[in-house]
Amino acid sequence: MKPTLFLLAAGMGSRYGGLKQLDGLGPNGETIMDYSIYDAINAGFGKLVFVIRKDFEQDFREKIISKYEGHIPCELVFQSIDDLPEGFTCPADRTKPWGTNHAVMMGADVINEPFAVINCDDFYGRDSFQVMGKFLSALPENSKNVYSMVGFRVGNTLSESGTVSRGICSTDANNLLTSVVERTKIQRLDGEVKYIDDNGEWTATPDTTPVSMNFWGFTPDYFAYSEEFFKTFLSDPKNMENLKSEFFIPLMVDKLINDGTATVEVLDTTSKWFGVTYPEDRQSVVDKIQALVDAGEYPAKLF
């Protein structure tokens, strides 16, 4: 069974003005998402599932889904702040979505096969889809608790316009994820990748240190774990009172790893990640995509 690609498109651009997922950056107005979908199709993915806001449906169908329909089956699911387990009510003042793992939970009714989760506005690169597609396609039927994450080399994920935050990954001898620690203010200083540690000191890390860019591989059993743990999350008054609290994927993954319930293999990729973190990044992304087209990695027109 071909794996599915689940695209997180409900949190349309906050830091960078406008709907950055719809920003044409390729030579024929292609979006970053177009490249991800092109790479996924070539890596053997068989279906796309997009999670979006319901009020964006018509626009999304006209501008986005219509492009891909002749190439790969597409489904839409919706994330709403009121979509909570029985017995829980969304605080009246809350406007912020419940986070990436809540978005993933919306796919439970339409995904019955191994699936990858990505952000829509990150350029992940061809090799990352190849390694994830290979991992998911090789899983035995009805496989459970064996997950994966594409580990980008931190040196391949920096922005020329400023510092970045990244989830720095630790692994064991079998390349299984043991922890993801969010580090801020990562940049290249004096030729080395450095970040500010817990003591406020600059700390160097090798260029090849794996970081998480929210490219995960799961099997459908992940949905039930998420449903259960989300109830625990909502039962904590701190999470209900804090109108910005979020149920993130790393929070769920961390729990499953620490409980010994699941393993997460870190898949190395040679792909360079890029994205529009800051408005000033836009031209650099346009140039990088053009360079990949010029090098023959992508056709000038994708779809």
Image (cartoon, helix red, strand yellow):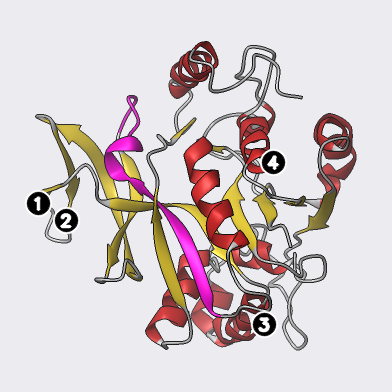
Q: Where is residue 7 in the image (x, y as percent from the top left)?
A: 67, 50
Dot 1 or dot 4, earlier in sequence: 4
Q: Which amino acid does label 4 sit on?
A: Ile
Q: Which amino acid does label 3 sit on?
A: Ala
Give how far apart the Cα atoms at labels 4 and 3 are.
28 Å
Q: Which residue is the site of mark 4?
A: 41
Query: Which quadrant of the rendered structure holds the C terminus?
Result: top right
Query: Between marks 1 and 3, how big is the CA–CA gap?
Result: 41 Å
What residue sits 26% from the left and 43% below the top? 185
What amino acid type is highlighted by mark number 1? Answer: Glu
Q: Is residue 301 above or below residue 111?
A: above
Q: Residues within 10 Å of mark 3 (few under 14, many from 20)?
A: few
Are circles 1 and 4 on residues that touch, CB within 8 Å?
Answer: no
Pointer 2 with pointer 1, Cβ within 8 A:
yes
Which is more N-terminal, label 3 or label 1?
1
Label of residue 201 in the image: 1
| Residue placed under numbered mark 3 in the picture | 224
The numbered mark, 2 or 4, whose residue comes first in the sequence reads: 4
| Mark 1–mark 4 distance (CA, rounded to whole Å) | 44 Å
Q: Which residue is drawn at 19% across and 33% down?
A: 188
Query: Which stretch is magenta?
Result: 145-162
Q: Are marks 4 and 3 in contact (CB under 8 Å)?
A: no
Where does residue 109 sit, x and y in percent of width and height? Answer: 82, 70
User: Which residue is the site of mark 2?
Assistant: 197
Q: Position of residue 235 (x, y in %)?
A: 58, 87
